Amino acid sequence: VDSSVAAALLQKQIQEATNTTNHWSLEAVHMTNWNHQDTDNDNNTSERNIPCHEREYRDAARVAQQLDHLPLSRIHLEADYWHHVFEPYLHQLLDHGRMGNPDIDCNIHIKFGALRNRILQQQQQQQQQQQQQQ
């Protein structure tokens, strides 16, 4: 929900600044951190057998669609999440009896680490491709 509200607010600011809805400098990114095939068997909807990460992506796609077809891409960060968040969390819990908050490490290592780096890499690659085409 927070990301959806932030995207809507940014979209509004861009539209006000450019007086247009045709040119986007805003894109949505869905990060997949966990892709276990776990489904919500208590959910009685037609999507109950769809893995949680896929339902979350579909939700993001619906929001992007409602925001004037905002471009949406998916970045897979499962390995990064496993190594930088989940394993250290288990280590602290099992070896030291400390129950930390994995969301803190996720923000540090995934959102503002791996995700940011991956997006910057993609932008650099796109810029290089555009320069080569000119």
Image: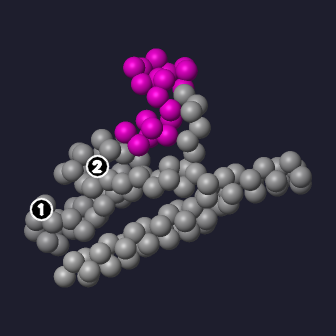
Instruction: Assign a secondary structure to mark 2.
Output: helix
Residues 64 and 87: in front is 87
Q: Position of residue 110 (x, y in %)?
A: 57, 61
Q: Is residue 2 visible?
A: no
- Residue 73 lies, in percent from the top left, at 36, 54
Mark 2 neighbour class, 10 Å CA radius: few under 14, some 14 to 19, many 20 or more: many
Magenta region, residue range: 40-58
* Relative vertical location of residue 16 with respect to residue 32 in this rendering, above or below: below
Residue 10: which disc?
A: none
Residue 109 is a magenta residue: no
Seen in the picture, residue 23 relative to 57 is either above or below; the reply is: below
> Of residues 80 and 43, which is closer to you in this image?
80
**Type of the residue with mark 2:** Ala
Badge 1 marks a residue whose secondary structure is: loop
**Residue 64, label in figure:** 2
Q: Residues within 10 Å of mark 1 (few under 14, many from 20)?
A: few
Q: Which residue is mark 1?
A: 22
Q: Is residue 49 left or right of residue 62?
A: right
Residue at 21% x, 65% y is 24
Check disc 1 and give the amino acid type. Asn
118 relative to 84 in the view: left or right: left
User: In this rendering, is residue 59 above or below 42?
Assistant: below
Q: Quadrant of the C terminus?
A: bottom left
Outermost residue to the top: 44
